[in-house]
Image (cartoon, rainbow, N blue to C red):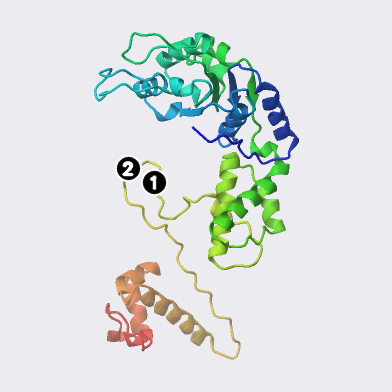
Amino acid sequence: MIGNQSPQLIGEDPSWLEAQEHVSRLAPLDRPCLIIGERGTGKELIGERMHFLSRRWDGPFVKVNCAALSEQLLDSELFGHERGAFTGATERRLGRFELANGGTLFLDEIATASMQVQEKLLRVVEYGEFQRLGGEKVLSTDVRVVAATNVDLPSKAAQGDFRADLLDRLAFDVVTLPPLRARPADISLLADFFARRMAREMAEDFPGFSPSAIAAMEAHDWPGNVRELRNFSQRITYRAIAEHSVDPVQFDVSALDPFDSPWRPSADLSGTPPVAPKTAPTAIAPPTPVLDIAFEEQVRLFETSLIDTALATHEGHQGKAAKALDLSYHQFRGLLKKYGYGKAATKSKPEKSGPIRSL
């Protein structure tokens, strides 16, 4: 349940205002309805608005996420159960339809409800009657049902995955919410609202977004819609504030995916520990040719720089250094001898204070 206050809805885009106007016209009618929209488009907020603009505004607004419960638990959650109805049912429990009496019941993710639960929903939506799980007495309730989903229910009904008769009863009218990509005029408005909320939470001032950040946010397609934009705008805001930056907040591509990391677990979920990404070997730029130095001397300088780098990288290990240079061990040893490394080039780690040749 929630308090008796209307939710704050942010947006000025015509498509969003049209959806709100649809809700305002539908809310006073005491009929069931459906709210359709992608994830993160604000279906629950619209459900709350539907309730507070209705004649039931001073009654309870009860929410149930159908996807979060198993079939038996959803049955018990919606309709209640009698003592002994199942293992662990030690006492009678009132269901959400009883708790929402005189108000609105918001059923989120309605498409995930089982056929058995849908059958019971059909009766209570049509006649206002139901029975508790494990009970025989027929109970009555006065509830307006507002259901929401992010899937195409007519298609599911055609495939036999959703009861067509329940769909007929729920779909007195359908409010379809626009995705955020269809509301470009609202992106900067929403981002600013969420960022300022984060700054207040951190007891800091919000310096605003840079023009390039706003342009980048407006160009992004936001598959997670408003919820994704909220997380992103607050993520880059708290990071900027934590760095004590007073400049306008910049767009940070790395903040779009908080899971992005070289140590991210593999998608196969096998539990295999992640390995560090392979990095390309460091390329050593050849020295700039100097015409007044002999050719052989410049070749010597370049080859010894390759040897020094390989030995330093592999802590004096000649075998690994040779492999890094794509040389056989004997070829590498020949170069060491050629340039006077001699017996000093060993596997031991070089002293920090001396050059690589003093190994």
Q: Is residue 319 above or below residue 292?
A: above
Residue plotted at (59% across, 36% down): 5
The answer to whether residue 296 of the structure is visible from this angle is yes
Number of residues whose C-alpha sits closer than 10 Å to that of mark 2, classed few (under 14), some (14–19) or many (20 or more): few
Residue 192 relative to residue 104: left or right: right
What amino acid is at disc 1?
Ser
- The residue labelled by disc 1 is 266
Residue plotted at (60% across, 41% down): 226
Residue plotted at (62% across, 62% down): 205
Screen quadrant of the C terminus: bottom left
Look at the numbered disc 2 and give the secondary structure of its residue.
loop
Number of residues whose C-alpha sits closer than 10 Å to that of mark 1, classed few (under 14), some (14–19) or many (20 or more): few
Q: Say whether marks 1 and 2 touch (CB < 8 Å).
A: yes
The outermost residue toward the bottom is 292
Q: Nearer the viewer, residue 268 or 147?
A: 147
What amino acid is at disc 2?
Ser
Look at the numbered disc 1 and give the secondary structure of its residue.
loop
Q: Is residue 122 above or below residue 96?
A: above
Residue plotted at (56% across, 42% down): 227
Where residue 157 appears, as percent x and y from the top left, is 53, 14
The outermost residue toward the right is 14
The outermost residue toward the front is 58
Label 1 to label 2: alpha-carbon separation: 8 Å
Give the number of marks: 2
- The residue labelled by disc 2 is 270
Quadrant in the picture for residue 27: top right
Q: Is residue 129 above or below residue 68?
A: above
Q: Nearer the viewer, residue 313 or 228?
A: 228
Where residue 328 appears, as percent x and y from the top left, is 33, 69
